[in-house]
């Protein structure tokens, strides 16, 4: 189904009107729209089965980012997030990429690592080669534990053995099972395989197996996104696009060399990625852990993105990072809104979902860098932050827009100021 992801004047509609428009645009069923229109999309009995000690449910705003064209396909991006500006910034940056075709993405195979820790080995180098010599037997044993995965074209593909000679606990081997998990996130699969091969590894090495667990540094499961924007599309009333490009590259360079800046820079990338991960019922903590570990892979913590100029002077941005997402298992299968998010996206594989996630992360990063390189981050955030302050002060209906406008005009966005203005208006 072909759609127009631009959603003109969408922000000026009420939530109910927006949902009516999206229902027609995407052809959502009455049941799908009911999940979004009515509270309680997650039944309490399902919530009770998902985690322990459940006493209720907690809601966050569910929004759609617009203007995304990814590999030539128009897409609306479901995002679950509480922070103002995320949806607006991602949507606006996606709009700027459209003249050059939007985002181009790619990904590697969905390979995950399971680690088997082996201690008490007196001849670690010899033990390492013993494991590698019996690689086929180890792989066959691992694959015997998941016939369904094998039938879908996945399974254990290889092993690596890492040697730590001088650990504080003596020589240690860590064997990695390299597993193609297909459309699963893969934690349960690789953990089961690691536990299955542990006795064989003890027999082959003469050591003792301790931990048997996946690694969240999914450095073999990478998703990539690229964008390109001409200088004229970055022009504003106050700044030339050529100057904006120079500012963006300077801001990126700051993050590339300074871990204090890189932490905030990468947090901005995750501002785009995490809401999509949450919306699809995936494990955002695993994605965060892998992202920040990957940002340190060169021996220091740096930027996950890169920003450059091409030979025509266009701004080009790239993002490559681990993206261990799944379409099956966990909350992705049990949460009704997670399933709806996948239907809205129309994704066919976990790799495709990961590529969409990094496209959103790249857009979000550009939004932050563009703001920082021009008027500063606060000016862009002020109106959106003012809405939260106004809501907290009790403004509703027409009061909300009036109060936001007053605070932004005076550049005085504070809770006590909002309360005073609201009292004043109601008194009149």
Image: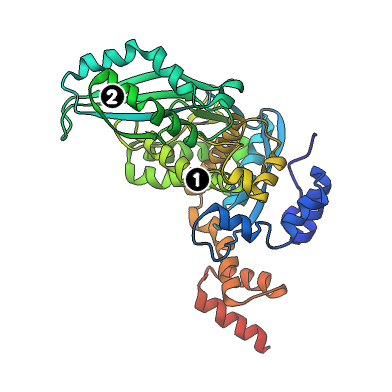
The mark that comes first in sequence, 1 or 2, is: 2
Spatial CA span between label 1 and label 2: 34 Å
The answer to which quarter of the image holds residue 230 is top right
Q: Which structural element holds mark 2?
A: helix
Residue at 32% in and 41% down? 258
Q: Position of residue 418 (x, y in %)?
A: 56, 76
Q: Position of residue 416 (x, y in %)?
A: 50, 78
Q: Would residue 32 appear left or right of 248 to someone viewing this image?
A: right
Q: Position of residue 336 (x, y in %)?
A: 67, 50
Q: Position of residue 82 (x, y in %)?
A: 56, 58
- Label 1 sits on residue: 284
Residue at 47% in and 24% down? 179
- Label 2 sits on residue: 202
Residue at 37% in and 45% down? 261
211 relative to 152, above or below = below
Q: Which structural element holds mark 1?
A: helix
Q: Would residue 366 appear left or right of 255 to someone viewing this image?
A: right
């Amino acid at each position: 189904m072909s759609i127009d992801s631009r959603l003109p004047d969408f922000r000026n509609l009420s939530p109910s009107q927006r949902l009516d428009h999206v229902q027609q645009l995407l052809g959502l069923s009455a049941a799908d729209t009911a999940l979004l229109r009515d509270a309680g999309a997650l039944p309490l009995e399902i919530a009770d089965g998902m985690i322990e000690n459940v006493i209720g449910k907690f809601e966050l705003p569910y929004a759609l980012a617009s203007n995304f064209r990814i590999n030539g396909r128009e897409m609306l991006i479901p995002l679950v997030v509480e922070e103002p500006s995320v949806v607006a910034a991602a949507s606006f940056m996606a709009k700027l990429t459209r003249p050059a075709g939007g985002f181009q993405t790619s990904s590697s195979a969905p390979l995950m690592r399971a680690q088997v820790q082996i201690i008490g080995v007196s001849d670690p180098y010899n033990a390492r080669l013993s494991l590698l010599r019996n690689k086929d037997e180890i792989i066959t044993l691992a694959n015997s534990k998941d016939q369904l995965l094998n039938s879908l074209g996945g399974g254990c593909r290889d092993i690596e053995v890492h040697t730590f000679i001088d650990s504080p606990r003596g020589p240690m081997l860590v064997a990695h099972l390299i597993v193609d998990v297909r459309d699963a996130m893969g934690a349960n699969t690789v953990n089961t395989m690691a536990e299955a091969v542990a006795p064989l590894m003890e027999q082959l090495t003469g050591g003792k197996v301790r931990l048997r667990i996946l690694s969240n540094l999914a450095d073999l499961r990478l998703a990539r996104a690229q964008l390109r924007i001409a200088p004229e599309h970055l022009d504003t009333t106050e700044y030339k696009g050529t100057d904006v490009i120079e500012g963006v590259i300077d801001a990126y360079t700051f993050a590339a060399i300074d871990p204090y800046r890189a932490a905030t820079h990468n947090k901005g990338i995750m501002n785009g990625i995490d809401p999509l991960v949450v919306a699809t019922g995936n494990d955002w903590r695993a994605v965060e852990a892998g992202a920040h570990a990957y940002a340190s892979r060169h021996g220091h913590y740096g930027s996950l993105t890169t920003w450059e100029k091409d030979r025509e002077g266009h701004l080009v941005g790239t993002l490559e990072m681990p993206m261990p997402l799944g379409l099956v298992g966990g909350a992705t299968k049990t949460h009704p809104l997670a399933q709806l998010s996948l239907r809205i996206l129309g994704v066919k594989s976990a790799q495709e979902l990961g590529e969409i996630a990094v496209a959103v992360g790249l857009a979000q990063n550009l939004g932050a860098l563009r703001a920082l390189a021009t008027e500063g981050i606060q000016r862009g955030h002020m109106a959106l932050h003012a809405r939260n302050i106004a809501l907290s002060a009790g403004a509703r209906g027409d009061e909300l827009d009036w109060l936001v406008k007053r605070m932004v005009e005076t550049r005085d966005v504070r809770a006590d100021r909002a309360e005073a203005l609201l009292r004043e208006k109601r008194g009149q």
